[in-house]
Image (tube, grey):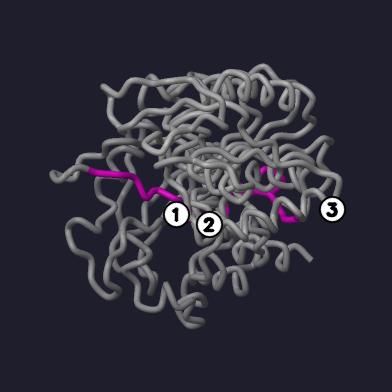
Amino acid sequence: MRVKKLADLDVSGKRVFIRADLNVPQDEAGNITEDTRIKASLPSIRYCLEQNAAVMVTSHLGRPDEGEVEPEDSLAPIAVRLSQFLHKPVRLIADWVEGGFDVSPGEVALLENCRCNVGEKKNDEELARKMARLCDIYVNDAFGTAHRIEATTCGIVRFAPVSAAGMLMGAEIDALSRAFDNPRRPLVAIVGGAKVSSKLTILKSLAAKVDQLIVGGGIANTFLLALGVDIGDSLAEHNLADEARRIMEIMRDRGAEVPLPVDVVVADEVSALARANKISVQAVGARDRILDIGPKSAARLVEIIADAGTIIWNGPVGMFELAQFAGGTKILASAIAHSEAFSIAGGGDTLAAIAKFNIADDVGYISTGGGAFLEFLEGKTLPAILALESAAE
């Protein structure tokens, strides 16, 4: 994935339009409750300010109706938080598409919620042209929206004089390229979660690429079911057992492997008070629910990860939210943290596990892309990155 990068551009005195991802959670009073995405946008903004560029930043927030900005849709709280981080005023500009406003060199202005503009979600060409006229350089720093074909992610690239990836987008592209384009082998993927159906495309895509495909949670239960293992009352998708069997066949035909649990942690209910029992996978009873992998299975995963050259992690291997079923995911996280392999991790539950077990500093790259990260794992081309690639040619 070859694109122009902001860090390689001279933006001094230029008008720079940054599409960021500032879609942060807020409480009912409009207070920001978690600002990781705002912090992630700062390097690109600071780079431009340090070079005395006139900086315009926009983002989506929530799912507003086009053509109107309701109070809950406004980026006003984000403008306040940005000004606190940057130690300078951040002006919020409404009705910005037609221009008519000035941003001075060394100033940063926040352009109101871009998804409130009519035509944004349909990638309207005229809207894209108008936005491109506002800038000398367009910067996409919103990897989390890279799978969206919208005016601020794709359309504007066609008409802006110069288009580039921002610091965050560039880091995402570099990490994904390192993990997929020419990975150091063995390439190990970990895919956990409740349902095969939600990650079937990902599993099929990875099965054609990786050397080891570790599955966890309800997904692993479905794979066990496909092998005829009695999984008791465990969460599984019986109708997808054949799909799980095909994925294992794809891996086997390539000389690769899907290592399944040989022992598990079970309980007869899902609760913080449930009694956890460690048993052989062959000893699962009719009322048992598999909620984690056992110590032998965890030890096997540690061996695989220790030998890995590249690790892709998306999803826990057990119900790690409850202490008695967190052991497998904790051991997995520790193994990744201590591995010399390049590791890339993404997905909400994965980020939660990384935070819970305090290994963020020991993971090679943590993607904040959400849906974009998952679509990339599915083998899909991300439209916003494709647009930047085309602009770089």
- Amino acid type shown at disc 1: Met
Q: Which residue is mark 2?
A: 15
- Amino acid type shown at disc 3: Asp
Q: Can residue 34 be seen?
A: yes
- Amino acid type shown at disc 2: Arg
* Depicted 180 relative to depicted 197: above or below: above
Spatial CA distance of label 2 from label 3 is: 54 Å
Query: How many numbered discs?
Result: 3
Q: In the rendered structure, are the residues bearing label 2 and label 1 in contact, judged by CB atoms less than 8 Å apart?
A: yes
* Depicted 346 relative to depicted 263: above or below: below
Q: Main secondary structure of the magenta part?
A: loop
Q: Which residue is mark 1?
A: 56
Along the line of sight, the residue nearer the viewer: 70 or 215: 215
State the extent of the magenta-drawn residues as a range: 1-26
Spatial CA distance of label 2 from label 1 is: 8 Å
Rendered residue at 77%/38% (across/down): 187
Mark linked to residue 253: 3
Q: Is residue 136 magenta?
A: no
Tag 1 secondary structure: strand
Rendered residue at 33%/31% (across/down): 268
Few, some or many C-alpha atoms within 10 Å of disc 2 (few <14, some 14-19, many ≥20)? many
Instruction: Indicate the position of residue 43 as horizontal and vertical percent values.
Output: 54, 37
Instruction: Indicate the position of residue 144 as horizontal and vertical percent values.
Output: 50, 52
Mark linked to residue 34: none
- Closer mark to the observer between disc 1 and disc 3: 3
Rendered residue at 56%/48% (across/down): 225
Q: In the rendered structure, are the residues bearing label 1 and label 3 in contact, judged by CB atoms less than 8 Å apart?
A: no
- Closer mark to the observer between disc 2 and disc 1: 1
Instruction: Indicate the position of residue 170 as horizontal and vertical percent values.
Output: 65, 46
Spatial CA distance of label 1 from label 3 is: 52 Å
